[in-house]
Amino acid sequence: MKIAIKLPFALLFLSATLASADPSPARIKELTHFVRQECGFCHGLHLTGGLGSPLTAPALHGKDAETLIAATLHGIPGTAMPGWAPFLSNADAHWIIHALKTGFPK
Amino acid sequence: MKITALLAALVLYSLPATAEPLMATGDLGLIVERATGSLLEVNTTHARILRRIEGLGDLSHASMVFSRDERYAFVFGRDGGLSKIDMLTGLIVKRVMQSGNAIGGAISQDGTIIAVANYTPGGVKFFDTDTLELLAEIPTGSKVVGIEDSTDNRFAFSLWENKQGEGEIWVADLSIDRKNPKITQFPNIGKQPYDALISPDGRWYVAGLFGEKGIAVLDMWHPERGVKRALPDYGRSDPTLPVYKMPHLETWAMVGNLAFIPGVGRHEVVIVDVSTWQQVGVIPVAGQPVFVIARPDGRQLWVNFAFPDYAKVQVIDVEARQVINTLQPGKAVLHMEFSPRGEQVWLSVRDGNRVEVYDTRTQKKRAELPALAPSGIFFTPRAHRFGL
């Protein structure tokens, strides 16, 4: 548990130094599945929205990436959007938001 | 002689080309394959797959109801598709795109009306079960959740958030005119109702609240008494505690006067005495429960969990009020369904691409069936129960 909580901070630090380092290809495969399935519960398997808002490229167009990354990691207070920091690193969240903004892989 | 030969030829000729044995549907079911937009038709007596039915669109979070003759399934797809499936032939009899984004539906007491709850545009639509012709439409200006059928061809449903950010409960009465539902609105029932259930007798409509504590209860025998709040301590103890998946209330496990419901964001099953609407206990479990379902005889509860504990399933002994077994079917057990009298339970194991069948008495696996990323499992006896 301790590790799980510390990990994101360690990675936060890491990603500050490796600003735009992408997750490994294996991790990207995991993340793709993760987003479609776990985020898909609320945002829809095709990310076209459900209880959560649509996360398609057109829906996110023009929205500030840093805000969306923060929402992904820490949730949106007062809404049903939970924070995923225990399971996603900063680099993961970066990759997810950029992938969402440019059209999420199948 | 000639005539008998002719008659015999006629009889032969009029037989269906494929002389399949006659089949009934009481032990059949459909399993949703969410990623591929397909369904598996299964037989529960022989734990067998009969066929795969394809072409149903986006089936993430899909659910279905059955016609009262248990022959047809009405499948509610996420993409707003409403499909009518003939379980005898495995064919899609009819399919309409009825909205942009749907969440679920219900079937009227007399079996003639299908109601569908929609997210976008928010509202409810009613369809004739024979033709899927649109009968009526109720725009709500909000996402609709927790649609349930009750007595007298009434449907109750909840509005996630109205313009003031409040939840509402509406009742649509189609008993007099199917094309002009009589609507009763109950505003300000609490913040963000996320799902609802109807008690097995069709009397109590109960909405769970996400945005605050408590539940909203409507007595369908006495709607004039209004919506009451109950269980003031039930809900998220800590609003910052993340909830990774909304618990489902649809099948509120009722045993006698006791209802067993998933704790929201908490690792517990909550016990409620419905004669007083008081919380009378909790049972600690291995994660945030999603479904808490009672075996038809009420002696056991089976519980599955939200991410990240969704590889497990726990079995609770109702008399002892404690967990008696923890199973590890594998990653992402999304749904569970009992056979009509509960001697077996079927579990969908999404990432394992299989459905597992367990003997509920021994809790040993009896069979395993291949399925593509399976989610919801629906057996035809649901046809004869309120709220399913």
Image: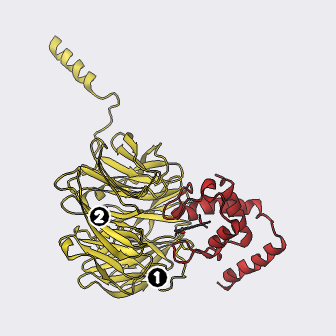
- Residue B134 seen in this snapshot: yes
Which of the image's four quarters has the C terminus of chain B? Answer: bottom left
Colour of chain B in the rendered structure image = yellow
Density class for disc 2 (Cα within 10 Å; few <14, some 14-19, many ≥20) is few
Q: Chain of mark 1?
A: B
Residue at 38%, 72% (x, y): give it.
B167
Percent position of residue B150, x then y: 24, 63
The residue carrying mark 1 is: B236
In the displayed structure image, the side of residue A99 where residue B277 appears, left or right: left
Q: Amino acid at mark 2?
A: Arg
Q: Nearer the viewer, residue A48 or B22?
A: A48
In the displayed structure image, the side of residue B290 where residue B353 appears, left or right: right
Q: Nearer the viewer, residue B3 or B309?
A: B309
Q: Amino acid at mark 1?
A: Arg
Percent position of residue B1, x then y: 15, 12
In the displayed structure image, the side of residue B210 where residue B226 appears, left or right: left
The circle on residue B341 is 2
Percent position of residue B372, x then y: 53, 52
Secondary structure at numbered mark 1: loop
Q: Chain of mark 2?
A: B
Question: Where B192 sits versus B368, above or below?
Answer: below
Residue at 41%, 58% (x, y): give it.
B122
